[in-house]
Image (cartoon, helix red, strand yellow):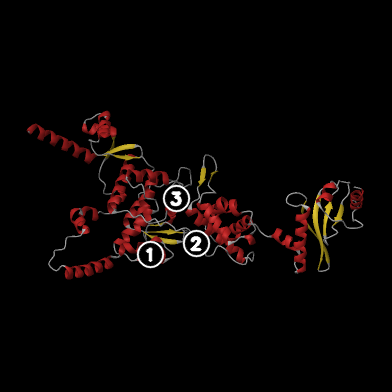
Amino acid sequence: MGSLETTLAKANSIMADRSVRINKRLIDSIKPTGKDRLIRDADLLGFGARVSALGLITYVFQYRFEGRQRRYKIGTHGSPWSPEMARLEAKRLIGLVAEGIDPQQTKFDERAELSVAELCDLYLAEGLLTRKESSISAARSDIEHHVKPLLGLRRVSSLSRADLEGLLRDVAAGKTAKTVKQGKRRLARVRGGKGAANSTLTTLSAALGFAVTRGLRANNPAIGIRKYPSKKIERFLSPAELARLGQVLASASSLGVESPFALAAIRILMLTGCRKNEILTLKRTHVDHYHRCLRLPDSKTGSKIVHLGMAAMRAIEAVPEVAGNPYLLPGKADGTHVTDLQACWERIRAAAELDDVRIHDLRHSFASVGAASGDSMLIIGALLGHSSPKTTARYTHLSDHPLKSAADRIADAIANFLDPDEVQPASAAEIRAQTSPSEHNLSLSPVLGSVIMAKWLDTRAAAARIGFTVGTMQTYRWMGTGPTFRKIGRRVVYAAEELDAWVAAQASAASESLAA
């Protein structure tokens, strides 16, 4: 016991006269003396324990590098740093010094290195200077909602391919799903999923590419990582669906159940093939009436000219102007434009029984009608403002009439050799063309409502027209035996012509019953 007290007494000086072996027994026996002191280990050169005036013990490693005395802090006593763990770390540091590596400078360099969160912030501020605000907003969303929660604290140089593959899996599995409050009475739900995972990896890969150009990394570990297969949604409206949509637009307009500017936006989107924001942010000064085109100063692919058909021009000219508002489709507040088209569109598409159709599918439908009419992919791409022919190539299968004709000729020739005396039955397409020619000859003008001559009536007006009460009309609807009706939003409407036809049919049936 006396020898230990002697050792401790000698360790209480700032620099011990001689070294002692640092072990758990010695460390546990150290008491604060109000002075800083250093205890050197007798067995391992450079290893020691620094004791503060308050008794805090820190393991250190002292060494000389390129003529300079350096002191490296291993860690504070306590988990995980026990005397033996600190001794092992000191041995590792001795090996680095022997290899010509300065451990202290390496630590300083690591502290100065950017974290993934800091790199992403730098990428948003400087790497996307020439990008559009919508692109910056999308990248910021990926970074804030997915990258930072999962990898934000990691050092840029420490990221590996496995880390990024883990990010892809975690976002797809919904590990970053949350609900975020955005302003008053607004919530944003982050769900994750495979689509969000692919987008997040693309954004992080771009940020790492930016890091490579800035010399912050030697390579981009995201290159070559396989993403989840993307689901290409290609929905095109048929002529019959276009007619139904036109009827709903006309009825909603005549009854006043939807904003006229929202309905006009849908019509113009269908007749121009433009992107939603290109029409919603369209100003009246962008409309060139003389050359019949839109001169957009900005779009997804930069400034462009959109050539208009007469039907589209009439739809634009029919939109009433609001004094003092520069936009074609003014919003509720002064000087603003329509921003929320989704709510109106969901009610319109439900009434037209097109629940799977998105607003962007109207653009696809515009292109599909052009392709089916024989217009070249070059012309369609120019009308849509595509910057790459690959984007327009998705509509190629709609304009493959020469291929179908060749397939018919070859198949017929082979069939004649196989069964020369057999009469070939008509194809399903030929039968449809003979039995329902009206569907294939439909014009696009019903979309504008210009040829929808039906007078639309609500339940009260319809009941008055045919001499029923409102309750009787509701009973007929419940029984499913009354005149045809449609629902626009929450309102039930009837076409006057269909009401008159139903009354005539009922009267005819009654006459036949009496005659029998």
Left or right of 286: which side holds 207? right
Compared with 356, 119 (above or below) is below
Q: Secondary structure at mark 2?
A: loop
Is residue 24 in view from this perspective? yes
Occupied quadrant, residue 15: bottom right
Residue type of the residue flagged with mark 3: Tyr
What residue is disc 2 on?
226
Q: Is residue 399 left or right of residue 64?
A: left
First along the sequence among labels 1 and 3: 3
- Marks counted in the figure total 3
- Point out residue 374 in the picture as x, y percentages from the top left corner: 29, 64
The answer to which of marks 1 and 2 sits earlier in the sequence is 2
Q: Position of residue 78 (x, y in %)?
A: 76, 49
Q: Residue 393 shows which numbered tag? A: 1
Q: Residues within 10 Å of mark 2 (few under 14, many from 20)?
A: few
The furthest residue to the left: 515
Q: Nearer the viewer, mark 1 or mark 3?
A: 1
- What secondary structure is marked by label 1? helix
Q: Position of residue 181 (x, y in %)?
A: 55, 42
What residue is rendered at 51% in x and 45% in y? Answer: 189
Residue at image position (23%, 37%) is 483
Q: Is residue 15 left or right of residue 183?
A: right
Instruction: Name the front one of labels 3 and 2.
Output: 2
Question: Residue 152 appears in which quarter of the rendering?
Answer: bottom right
Query: What's under tag 1, amino acid-wise?
Result: Ala
Give the Cα distance between marks 1 and 2: 24 Å
Q: Which residue is mark 3?
A: 327
Label pair 3/2, CB-CB below 8 angstroms: no
Mark 1 to mark 3 CA distance (whole Å): 33 Å
Does any portion of residue 129 appear in the rendered image?
no
